[in-house]
Amino acid sequence: MTPATRFPVSVLTGFLGSGKTTLLQKLLHHPGMARTAVVINEFGEVGLDHLLVAKASENMVVMDSGCVCCTIRGDLVDTLRDLFLKRVKGVIPEYDRVVVETTGLADPAPIIHTLMSDPLLAARFRLDGVISTVDAVHGSDQLDRNPESVKQAAVADRIVLTKTDAASPPATAELLKRLAVINPAAPVIPAAFGDVDPAQLFDAGLYNPATKAPDVARWLKEEAYRAEGHGHHHHHEHDHEHGEACGPDCGHDHDHDHGHDHHHDVNRHDDHIRAFCMVEEQPIPWDRFVDFMEALITTRGPDLLRIKGMLNVPESELPIVVHGVQHMFHPPVRLDAWPTDDRRSKIVFITRDVGHQVIEDLFNGFVRGEGTAPEVPEGARPE
């Protein structure tokens, strides 16, 4: 099925108490959600009793806005298959997109892996993006205490800043600075009392429904990761202040200080996140790129939070788009045309404790043939 016929799926995540449930309640009322199916963990949590219009089945209700709300039954695969079949049979109103809510402690990666790896789901659904709620009042404290909340913000395509009505302007400004370092590319959407226009949350994926074509520049946003004047491979990192203690395996790039230092506790979780873009002038042979990614996944898979790229490979006159989350890669996509005259390969990395230099060295070894490329164990190819 073409992207136009596969339903976009947005993953809604956010830490416990970050306002995700309030946001969902407001979204379910919004007329802009009319052709949306929302998959939640429990009806009770969202408090739908007074909103019900019709019960389509035991785990599905049709909301007053016209959107379909259903709870996860069995697992996500079963629920999405059920949702698709009920749409085909006309049991529920037709929907054009799906929103899947994670639990407050959840890592969004397994949901993305499910969408990428289940053949039946991959044929009918496509990942649109990750929406993460961050609490303007308690957000900094949650980022300090919970590595999971940092990860949720780091992999997001959209960040919804909740409770802005109750937060002090200085605290909000400090939190926004932190979020810009953790995730330079994601727009931050303020939501007082949970009010957000759903149109601001969607269409974050490679495929742009407005143009009915891939829009790689909007999806990759590589310029957000590049601060001019930092050498051939521009990158944006948040490093420890010089002189602060680091472990031997910290992965920090101590030679590259790009002015994002703050006076803070060295154990702060967002200091472990790296967000940067590699730009390669020469075409990258596909098999060498695969070997490079295999080595990276084998050695640092869990710490590769997200990888997005557009590659110029000698085997194709057209660009190849790649997208990975930890050890799992989406099948590569060949675009119909180059978006601009720029033919350089651009790869965005969001990592945890894997510095730019570590990846650059591996890339040099495998792709550029500089230095010795380590052996990759059998069976360690990207999924």
Image (cartoon, helix red, strand yellow):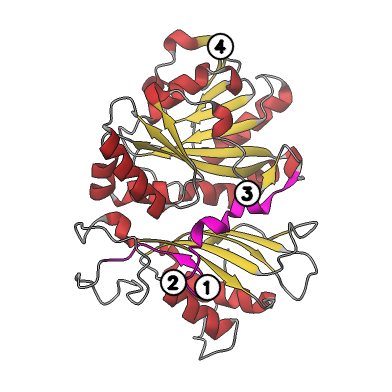
- Residue type beneath disc 3: Arg
Which residue is disc 2 drawn over?
356
Query: In the rendered structure, which disc, 2 or 4, sits on the residue that comes first in sequence?
Result: 4
Q: Is residue 203 left or right of residue 100?
A: right
Which residue is disc 3 drawn over?
218
Q: CA distance from mark 3 to mark 2?
A: 23 Å
Q: Residue at x 19, y 71 (%)?
A: 245
Q: CA distance from mark 3 to mark 4?
A: 33 Å
- Give the quarter of the image for residue 381: bottom right
Which residue is disc 1 drawn over?
233
Query: In the rendered structure, which disc, 4 or 1, sits on the residue that comes first in sequence?
Result: 4
User: Which residue, as the protein is rendered here, is positioned at the far front?
Assistant: 229
Residue 118 seen in the current view:
no
CB contact under 8 Å: marks 2 and 4:
no
- The residue nearer to you, when weighing 265 against 354, is 265
Q: Is residue 94 left or right of residue 325?
A: right
Location of the C terminus (image quadrant): bottom right
CB contact under 8 Å: marks 1 and 2:
yes
Q: Position of residue 75 (x, y in %)?
A: 49, 38
Q: Position of residue 74 (x, y in %)?
A: 49, 35
Q: What's the mark number on residue 64?
A: 4
Query: In the rendered structure, which disc, 3 or 2, sits on the residue that comes first in sequence?
Result: 3
- Residue type beneath disc 2: His
Q: Residue at x 51, y 85 (%)?
A: 375
The stretch of residues the image draws in magenta is 213-240
From the image, state whether disc 3 or disc 4 is nearer to you: 3
- Residue type beneath disc 1: His
